[in-house]
Image (cartoon, helix red, strand yellow):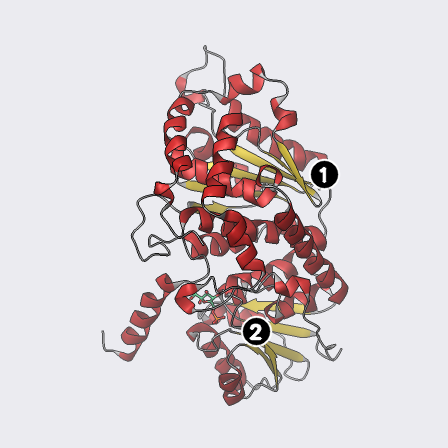
Amino acid sequence: MNTSSPLDCPAWKKLEAHADTWRAARLAELLAGDPGRARQMVAAAPGVELDYSRQRVGALTLRLLARLAAERGFEEWREALFSGKKINTTEDRAVTHTALRASPVKFKPVDPKYTRVINLGTGGSDLGPRLLADAFGDGKRDVRFVANIDPVERERAVAGAQADSTLVVVVSKTFSTQETLENAKALKSAGFRNFIAVTANAKAAEQFGASEILPMPESVGGRYSVWSAAGFAGLLAIGGEAFAEFVSGGREMDEHFLQEPVESNVPALMALLGAWNVNFLGLGALAVLPYAHRLRLLPAYLQQLEMESNGKSVDRGERTVGYATCPVVFGAEGTPAQHAFMQLLHQGPQPVAADFIDCSVNEALSANARAQADALAYGTSEAELPPHRRHPGNRPSSILKFRQFTPRDLGRLLALYEHKVFTQGVLWNINSFDQWGVELGKQLANRILKGVA
Ligand code: F6P
C-alpha cells in the first residue's frame, strides 16, 4: 500500500505547475464562455447530484487529480477499508463502519413505558444520534442529549423526568470519558435507575451498574459510529423503520463509492476538489451550508468527522507533512447563515470554499442556495459600483442537490462525507482513524483537577 509522501507523486508536481495557470482564471468567464460547463461538471450518486461547475477546475485539472488518486493507490486503500485490513495503524485496528451498513445491528424493542430517553455521551457518542433525532425525531418519545460537563445541560435534560419512565443511554466507546461518566454518576445519584450502556468496555460499564450493555466494536471510531449501537437514542427518536432506511442509504453510498470510477465517484470527486482548493489554490477553510432546518446540526457533525479525522500534520510514515491537510470546517443552516457570516465568504480577503447542500425543501431554499453559489462564483461586474459594494467573485463552491430529503438521504449524505474524508486521508497519507491530538488536553485537565498542575 502506498505510504509515500504525495509530494513525491508526479501528478502532485504537475498540479502545482497547473495551478499557476488557474490563479488568473475567472469563474465568471469560464461559466459564461462555456454553456456546456454546467451540464458536464455534474456527477450523480444515489438520490443526489453534485454540481461542481463553480469549482476553479478545467478538464486537465480533473485528469491530473484523477491521476493523483491513482498514484496514491486510492483503489487499493479503498479495498483495504472494505475488506477489514488494519488500516488504523497507530491503534493496530481495522476500520469497520462500512460493515455496520452491510450487516446492520439488530436492536431489541424498548419498553413503551420509557417516555423519556436521555443520551449521555460526547463527540461521536453524541453528535450522530443527536443529529438523527433533531432531523427526523417523530415526537413519540422525548429524547434528550447531554454532552457537556456543565450541569446546566443535564439539568435541562432531566427537568420533569420520572425515574421509572426514563431510560438513560450512556454511550462511551472507552467508558472512561470524564464528561460522560460524571453525568452518568450524577443521574444515578439523582435516583435514575434504568441505564443502558453502549460501549466497547463492557467491564467498566458493568462496574458502573448498567442493566444492559450494547456492544460497540473496537474497530469503529466514535465519529463513524452512528450506524452502530451508538446511534440507539437516534433510533428511539426516529423509529426503527426510519433508522433502517438511514442505514440502507449509507449502504447505497458505499456501493457507489466502491463501484464508480474516480471521475464519476461523488465522494472521491469531492475529496479531490477539496484537496485542489486546499493544497493548490491555498483555501484553508470550508463552509458547509445545508439548506434545510433538519440539517442544522450537520456542520457540528462534519466538524468532528473532518477535523478529528484529517486535522493532522504527521503522515503514515511518522514524518511531518510538508503540505496543508484538513481545512477549517464550519457552517450553519441556510438561509440564517446568509444573515450571519456569509458576508466574509463574499467579501473577506481570505477566500473560503463552500459546499451547499440543497435538500429540495422548497423553491425559496433552493433558490437561495443557488443564488449564494452564483454570487460567490460570478461576483459583481458593474464597474460603476463603489468598491464597498463590489463582490470579487471567483470563490469556488459545489452544490449537492438532493431530490428530496428523507432518513435514507441522511444516510447517503453522512456516508458520502465519510468516504470523502477517507479519500483525503489517502491523498494526504494520513491515518484518518486515530485522534491522538485530543489526549494531551484530557491529561492536563485531570492533573489540574487533582491539583498537580
Ligand atoms: O476526545 C475525543 C473522543 O475520543 C472522540 O473521538 C470520541 O467520539 C469522544 O471523545 C467520546 O469518546 P467515548 O465514546 O470513548 O466516550
In this rendering, position of residue 212 left or right of residue 180: right
Mark 2 closeness class: few <14, some 14–19, many ≥20 residues within 10 Å: many
50 or 102: nearer the viewer: 102
Label 1 vs 2, first from the N-terminus: 2
Amino acid type at mark 1: Asn
Q: Is residue 324 visible?
A: yes
Q: Where is the N terminus found, in terms of image quarters?
A: bottom left
Q: Secondary structure at mark 1?
A: loop
Residue behind mark 2 = 216
Amino acid type at mark 2: Met
At 52% from the left and 16% from the top, the residue drawn is 29
Pointer 2 residue Cβ closer than 8 Å to ligand 1? yes
Q: Position of residue 158 (x, y in %)?
A: 58, 74
Camera-nearest label, 1 or 2: 2
At 59% from the left and 17% from the top, the residue drawn is 34
269 or 110: nearer the viewer: 269
Pointer 1 residue Cβ closer than 8 Å to ligand 1? no
Q: Position of residue 33 (x, y in %)?
A: 56, 15
Q: Residue furthest left?
A: 453
Residue behind mark 1 = 362
